[in-house]
Image: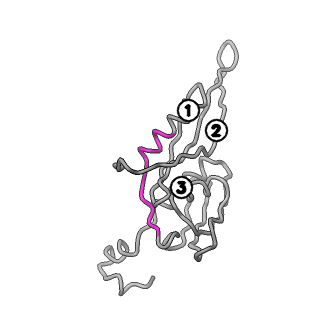
């Protein structure tokens, strides 16, 4: 997705992990960073970077996240309908919430939803508690969301004739 030049992207580190590779002389340490970027207005992306230093790993993650930006359909600061997302052993349930409810989500799910610009939502994370799995599950769920207009056009109907 092409990023407009005037868009200000916010980046947040979700998780930094120290990984070790055992070699003949001992252990070699490197770092992996899970990073999310978003414009707080319906676009978000996630990236995973690995390097010998933390700052380099974060920068690689940010660059990958910018390449993976996608649009999240939002209606009045929340998602259009509730969704159960699954990816591997992770499950995330997301439900639209009334105005003023806020983002009720934990850990990695909260970071992604806030960067996407979601203002009101209820979520529950089930299954795996691994940050990478939860992030992938959340992203899959958000990517599968469609606007009411898209749903109406796939069904070959007008927006007024389908129930919202």
User: Disc 2 marks which residue?
Assistant: 16
Report the magenta residues as a range: 62-74
Report if the CB atoms under discs 2 and 3 are less than 8 Å apart: no
Say which label, 1 or 2, has the lower sequence index: 2
Residue 11: image tag: none
Q: Is 100 left, or right, of 4 in this rendering?
A: right
From the viewer's side, name the closer residue of 115 and 28: 115
User: Disc 1 marks which residue?
Assistant: 57
Find out whether residue 121 is within the magenta segment.
Answer: no
Query: How would you rate the neighbour count of disc 2 (Cα within 10 Å): few for under 14, some for 14-19, many for 20 or more?
Result: some
| Residue 70 quadrant | bottom left
Residue at x-position 31% and y-position 82%: 157
* Furthest residue toward left: 156
Residue 115: image tag: 3
Report if the CB atoms under discs 1 and 2 are less than 8 Å apart: yes
Task: Give percent across and percent down for residue 105.
Answer: 65, 62
From the viewer's side, name the closer residue of 145 and 16: 16
Real-space Cα separation, disc 1 to disc 3, in angstroms: 20 Å
């Amino acid at each position: 997705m092409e990023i407009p030049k005037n868009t200000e992207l916010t980046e947040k580190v979700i998780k930094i992990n120290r990984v070790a590779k055992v070699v003949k002389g001992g252990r070699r340490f490197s770092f992996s960073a899970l990073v999310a970027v978003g414009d707080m207005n319906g676009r978000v992306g996630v990236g995973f970077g690995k390097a010998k230093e933390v700052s380099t790993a974060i920068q690689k993650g940010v660059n990958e996240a910018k390449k993976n930006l996608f649009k999240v359909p939002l209606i009045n600061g929340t998602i259009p309908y509730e969704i159960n997302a699954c990816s591997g052993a992770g499950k995330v349930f997301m439900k639209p919430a009334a105005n003023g409810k806020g983002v009720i989500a934990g850990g990695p799910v909260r970071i992604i939803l806030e960067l996407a610009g979601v203002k009101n939502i209820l979520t529950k994370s089930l299954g795996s508690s691994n940050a990478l799995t939860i992030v992938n599950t959340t992203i899959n769920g958000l990517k599968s969301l469609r606007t009411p207009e898209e749903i109406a056009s796939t069904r070959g109907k007008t927006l007024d004739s389908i129930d919202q």
